[in-house]
Image (cartoon, rainbow, N blue to C red):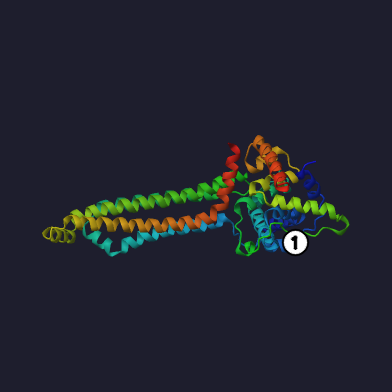
Amino acid sequence: MDELDILKKDWNKEKVDYPKLSYDDIYKMILKKSSSIVKWIFIISILEFTFWIAISFLMKGSSYSGKLEALDLDHILIPISVISYGILIYFFYLFYKNYKNISATDSSKKLMENIIKTRKTVKYYVIFNLVFLVVGAVIGAIYGFNHNPEFSSQLELATANGQVFKFYAVIVIVIILVLAVTIGVLLLFYWLIYGILLKRLNRNYKELKKLEV
Amino acid sequence: MNKELEHSFVELLEKHQNIVHKVCRLYTNNYDAHNDLFQEITIQLWKAYPKFRGDAKFSTWMYRVGLNTAITLYRKSKRSIKTQDFEGVEFKIKAEDYDDTEEQQLKVLYKAVHQLNDIEKALVFLYLEDKDYREISETLGISEVNARVKMNRIKTKLRTILNP
């Protein structure tokens, strides 16, 4: 008889005095709120969607946006807005569909895969926003170089002083730094939140996958 | 959800609550954690209950939700991780069943099982509950062959833990 069989004999004897919960104890429990990781993923994901929507509204209301309006870019900005809201709706639909698919009655592996899939939808949306941010910043900078009168006068001043290279270098470095810091902070935030929240799930999923090899 | 559903669920769970206690016994190390996990499994069972069809046994259905909660969904609360006790929760043994030597041996065995990882514990749990490899593989989402291979490895691992 191996170790597990000795344990099995004991396990099924029902001689252990487990706490005996009454009908009322259990009834009270079903009224309480879950604190599962799925609930947390849902809350954080909604916050992420809200964050990016808020960013887009803040940018619209900013002075930078006022300057853009002065440049009369409606023919570019309106289609971009429509596309970005369309993409937001698409991602949100995917996220909600995947979230609804999460069921505790699936097999452990399927459950983990559905959670990871839901999580990935939001991750892709964030990556899309970051790419959008970088591309937007680059296009905005190039457009500004060519069309902003304020910039032209600054450039003329720099040319007169023989500092054209330094002028461009400073602008490029500032843009790169701002983007790097923004992305860095977001990634750190991600790494911390999801690292902690999904550590166990990832470890167990890896273990299950390992069995398939 | 209507009262009738609540009533039938609570009644069923009251009757089969030992299954949940057994899952908690394997996955937690102290009473607070045991209660926390029990609470979360109850909520997950209740959330899934409207989709429960009578064609599966309530207890069989509980294994799946219970293990999924313990392995994947449960987020340890601060309260439950403040104390770490690797020997697990020791429940009282009914006086008439107490045998000192046997209890010592079992204590060591439970301690060894507590050192296994979450997936290994799930396999052990289902094995102890006398489930066949088909059910073990379906519950975890792995193939039957892999479930058998893993089970043998767990037995070897336990032996190594017990006889280092």
Q: Secondary structure at mark 1?
A: helix
| Residue B40: x %, y % from top left | 64, 58
Q: Number of callouts in the render?
A: 1
Q: Nearer the viewer, residue A20 or A76?
A: A20
| Residue A37: x %, y % from top left | 57, 55
Image check: B140 left or right of A196?
A: right
| Residue B143: x %, y % from top left | 64, 36
- Using a 10 Å C-alpha cutoff, classify the residue at mark 1 as few (fewer than 14 neighbours), some (14 to 19) or many (20 or more): some
Q: Nearer the viewer, residue A89 or A123?
A: A123
Name the residue tied to disc 1: A23
Q: Residue furthest left?
A: A160
Q: Nearer the viewer, residue A62 or B81?
A: B81
- Residue B54 showing in the rendered view: no
- Residue A198 showing in the rendered view: yes
Q: Residue at x 57, y 50 (%)?
A: A201
Q: Residue at x 56, y 54 (%)?
A: A38
For disc 1, the chain is A
Please tell me in which quadrant of the rendered image residue A175 appears: bottom left
Q: Residue furthest front?
A: B164
Please tell me in which quadrant of the rendered image residue A23 appears: bottom right
- Asked if B9 appears above or below A9 in the picture, the reply is below
Image check: A127 left or right of B57?
A: left
Disc 1 marks a residue whose amino acid type is: Tyr
Q: Looking at the figure, which quarter contains the N terminus of chain B?
A: bottom right
| Residue A25: x %, y % from top left | 72, 63
Image check: A192 left or right of B56?
A: left
Q: Residue at x 22, y 53 (%)?
A: A143
Q: Nearer the viewer, residue B19 or B47?
A: B19
Q: Residue furthest right?
A: B96
Image check: A87 left or right of A172?
A: right
